[in-house]
Amino acid sequence: MKRFYKQAGVSSAADGHRVALDGKPIRTPAKAELLLPTAALAEMIATEWQGQGEEIRPGDMPLTQLAATAIDRVSKEREAVIEELVGYAETDLLCYHAEEPQDLVARQMAAWQPLLDWAAETFEAPFQVTAGIMPARQPEPALRGVRRALETLSDLELTALASLTACCGSLIVALAVRHGQISAEEAFSVSQLDETFQIEQWGEDEEARKRRALLMRDIEAASVCLSLCRLS
């Protein structure tokens, strides 16, 4: 789509904050108002739109995409999204440790076990860890604990958390970002630990480098969205 506006700005009212293009509020693909919970998030989304060139590239506006998804889909399908995320927890990356080599085993233990311990304490969610690829059945208290945590989130936070979970293959990692336990960079490092280990052994091709760069971008965007949801 060709750029059709000159200026992106923010307008605030009692019911929320809007991003406007030449004074006209943005709408989602489903034609709903793009109403945002904080001025800080609205300003960042306005920056995404202002930074577009002669052509509008939605893929370069991850915060806009997260906000629109929250309004158009997640607000109508909250329970389904929560069920999907609990499903991730049933096969969470952090619960599947390697059996060898010992260097990788040690790295996983050092990076992953503190997050598992944190989840157990914070959400009363004691996850079961296994070695190899055999599935580990997660105890119901663990699943109930993370479900309670998800149910407290707003639609937009839930959307950002779902994006983080998909990027990292781990609901535990995503929740750790949401609660300030780890940064976006640490989330990338923790979730990409196995692949980084393989790259150290065999090198990295250009396709893998680009894929990891896009993954880091999406993790950062979801992390920023979660942070801005809590700023006035």
Image: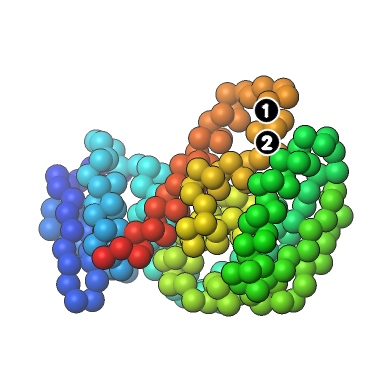
Q: Is residue 26 above or below residue 37?
A: above
Relative depth, front residue between 61 and 13: 13
Q: Could you say whether the residue bearing mark 2 is in a helix, strand or loop?
A: helix
Task: Describe residue 5's horizontal placement relative to residue 63 as left or right.
Answer: left
- 87 over 57 or under it: above or below: below
Q: Which mark is residue 14?
A: none
Residue 56 seen in the figure: yes
Count of picture labels: 2
Q: Residues within 10 Å of mark 2 (few under 14, many from 20)?
A: some
Q: Quadrant of residue 29?
A: bottom left
Q: What separation in Å lies between label 1 and label 2 (alpha carbons)? A: 6 Å
Question: Amino acid type of disc 1?
Answer: Ile
Task: Give the colour scheme of this rendering.
Answer: rainbow
Image quarter where the N terminus lies is top left
Image x and y of residue 155, in percent: 44, 70
Question: In this rendering, does residue 163 appear at all?
Answer: no
Dot 1: element: helix
**Residue at horizontal 82%, vertical 37%?**
102
Seen at 58% across and 24% down, the residue is 206
Q: 150 left or right of 31?
A: right
**Quick one: 187 or 169, which is closer to the camera?**
187
Q: Residue at x 77, y 72 (%)?
A: 139
Query: What amino acid type is highlighted by mark number 2?
Result: Glu
Q: Residue at x 76, y 37 (%)?
A: 104
Q: Give the x, y percent position of residue 111.
A: 66, 46
> Dots 1 and 2: beta carbons under 8 Å?
yes
Please state, as top left, top right, bottom left or bottom right, where the C terminus lies in the image.
Answer: bottom left
Question: Residue at label 2?
Answer: 195
Circle 1: is it few (<14), some (14-19), or many (20+) Cα within 10 Å? few
Q: Measured from the top left, where is residue 217 in percent x and y?
A: 46, 42
Residue identified by numbered label 1: 199
x, y percent for residue 220: 45, 47
